[in-house]
Every structure is written in structure tokens, then in C-alpha cells.
Amino acid sequence: MTRRFASLVLSAAGWMAFNAVMLWTVAFLAGVVVPRTVDGPIRVARGAAIGIDLALVLLFALQHSVMARRPVKAWLRRRIPEQLERATYVLAADASLIVLLLLWQPWGGRVWDVGGTAAVLLWSVCALGWVLAAAATYAVDHLELTGLRQAGWGAPRPAMPANLTTTGLHALVRHPLMLGLLIAFWATPRMSSGHLLFAAATTAYIAVGLRFEERDLRRTFGSAYDDYAARVPALVPGIRSAWRVFGGRAAA
């Protein structure tokens, strides 16, 4: 009973931190509410700031990529209870993102700064990106994605081969979470040099990370994933995939 209670508490802490850090990141990039944002205040010289910021993104990328690899997952399961493996990953991701948000060093410069209707449009697109990213976590099993189900929150799923999700948002693009994040990172009416570095560095990480994820998905699902990839684009929605999602609903 004590071990189960500890699993429930640890996984719940990871889930709450996941949501809190996501909201923090929204405020950090929008430049609202939080005292330290992607744009300021400036605390160190430009050269040092760029070096620190790139190191922070690299730390975040390494945590996400290394802990997601199968050999590392197997290593973790030998050292922690299997039901906490995903919750541990979520907590580590929370910690790495908190470090990035706390230690990020703005360094000034303005790439673009628009107002009026253009600003409203860009903020709307940014909000759409965050909504898409959040919705993508529910397009699959949100409890399993965040480690809650494995730790005992919700009914356990029967042991069976993993299913390939190809409906809903995944009928539009194969990686809706990544698409939502990319939109949110780039859609802003005030793009500083530091924000541009953040957007570019995280975009590069997403591109590399997707190559590894695609490789793992093909290993897991084989020809089924090859057929799915032939029909549905990875990130940029195509006319045919959009028609299947929205046109099909209208017809129904």
C-alpha cells in the first residue's frame, strides 16, 4: 500500500508540474506575468548569453532524446519500479525545462515588431498553436502519456500490442503535438533576437527528435506505419489529409 501511495503521489506531482511548466512557458514566450521572459531582463553580455542559451536547449534536448530511447528505458526499469518509468521521464522533463526557463539569458535585438491587426492575428495563431499542442496530448491516452495510468491513476489498460493512432488530429498530421509547439514558438508579433534563437534551436531539436521517433515508430508498427506515413504528412497538413478530417465530418 505504501509503495502504491508513493507511486500515485510521484506521478501526480509530475503531472501537476507538467501543466504548471507548460503555462509558465506560455507566459515566458509571451512576455507576460512572469518576471523573467525570453526577452528580458538582460543580465549578461550577448556572447555569454548565446552560449548559455544554446547549452540550455542542448540540455533539454539531450534529456528528452536520451531518456526516450529504448535501451535507456530498459536500464531505468531495472532500477526503478516499472510503473514509475514514464512518471520519472515526465519529472525529468519538467526539471530540464524549469532549468531552461530560470537560467535563460535574453540579449536584446529586435527581428520584427508589429501592431494592430497583424499583432492580433499573430497572437491568435500563437494561441491556436498552444491549444493544438495541449489537445494533442489528449488525442492519444493523456493518462498514459503523462505516466498517471501506469502509476495507478485510472483503470489499467489490458496488455496488448500498442495501437497506432491514425484518427482525429493524427489524420491531419502524424505529429500534431510538435506542429502545435512550432506554431506557438514562431507566431509572435514581437520577435526578439533571443526569441528567434529559442525558436530556431527548438525547431532544430524537433527536426532531429522526429527522425529518431519516426525510426522507433517504424520499428514498432512496421508496414502499418509506412502506409500511414504515405497517406499523412509529418507536420504540414496537406489538402487531402485536411479534407479527410474536416470534409469527412461535414459530409457526415
Image (cartoon, rainbow, N blue to C red):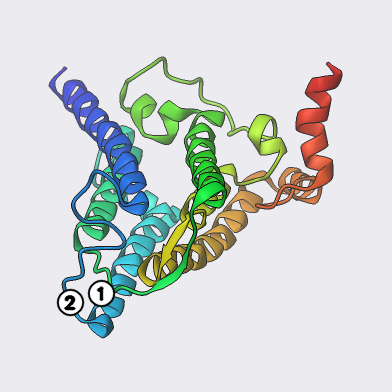
Left or right position of 136 against 43: right
Q: CA distance from mark 1 to mark 2?
A: 10 Å
Tell me which numbered mark, 1 or 2, is placed earlier along the sequence: 2
10 Å neighbourhood of mark 1: few (<14), some, or many (≥20)? some
Q: Tell me where residue 72 appears, x and y as whole percent.
A: 37, 56
Question: Mark 1 and 2 residues: CB-CB less than 8 Å, in contact?
Answer: yes
Q: Is residue 159 above or below residue 86?
A: above
Which dot, 1 or 2, sits closer to the camera?
2
Q: Nearer the viewer, residue 179 or 5?
A: 179
Q: Which mark is residue 52?
A: 1
Q: The residue under label 1 is which amino acid type?
A: Ile
**In the displayed structure image, the side of residue 3 where residue 215 appears, left or right:** right
Quadrant of image for the C terminus: top right
**Percent of width and height locating residue 79:** 24, 47
Asked if residue 163 is positioned above or below residue 219 in the image, the reply reads: above
Residue pictured at 54% horizontal, 31% vertical: 140
Task: Say which residue appears at 29% left-offset and 73% top-offset.
Answer: 55
Residue lying farthest left? Answer: 2
Residue 223: give x, y in percent of width and height.
76, 47
**Residue hosting label 2:** 44
